[in-house]
Amino acid sequence: MYCKNCGSEIDDNAMVCPYCGVMTDKANGQLASQKSGSNAIAIVGFILSFFFWIPGLICSIVGLKNAPQYGGKGKGLAIAGIVLSVLSGVFVIFYVALSIVKGGTNMFLY
Ligand SMILES: [Zn+2]
């Protein structure tokens, strides 16, 4: 790419122009992608994991992936959400398997 300040040809991955010291578009783009605020998806994932483990797990994984963009915010929450939703998932599968073994719908007849 070319420096927008002095027009010199510089490395595509350069953050600063080596000729004039001005920040490149890449550096500006990286600053812009640093989102402010909280990692909402990690919070949503954590809450969802209590009630719906599959969307909770998905949101928590996305939240964990997005955490670096928020300066690591929500990382702990996302991990907690993943653990919780995996646990509820295991519980649900265990419960369903148990009711199948016990004869499933029969228990509603008594
Ligand atoms: Zn330059």
Image (cartoon, rainbow, N blue to C red):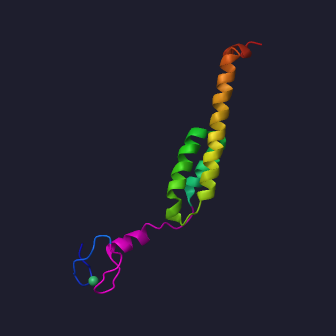
Q: Position of residue 73 (x, y in %)?
A: 58, 63
Q: Quadrant of the N terminus?
A: bottom left
The furthest residue to the right: 110
Residue 46: x and y in percent read 63, 49
Quarter holding the C terminus is: top right
Residue name at image x 54 percent, y 54 percent = 63
Above or below: residue 6 compared with residue 48: below
* Closest to the observer, 19 or 40: 19
- Magenta: main secondary structure equals loop
The quarter of the rendering in which ligand 1 is drawn is bottom left
Residue 68 lies within the magenta run: no
Residue 49 location in percent, x, y?
63, 44
**Residue 19 lies in the magenta-colored region:** yes
Find residue 51 and report its horizontal and vertical position in percent: 65, 40
Name which residue lies at 30% across and 83% down: 18
Establish if 35 lies above or below 16. above
Number of disc labels: 0
**Span shown in magenta:** 14-38
Question: Which residue is at the far bottom?
Answer: 20
Quarter location, residue 93 = top right
Residue at 53% from the left image edge and 49% from the top image edge: 61
**Which quadrant would residue 6 be assigned to in this image?**
bottom left
In the image: residue 62, left or right of residue 2: right
Q: Considering only vertical position in the picture, is 101 above or below 82?
A: above
Question: Compared with residue 47, is residue 18 higher up or lower down, i.e. above or below?
Answer: below
Residue in the picture at 69% in, 20% down: 99
Res 52 quadrant in image: top right
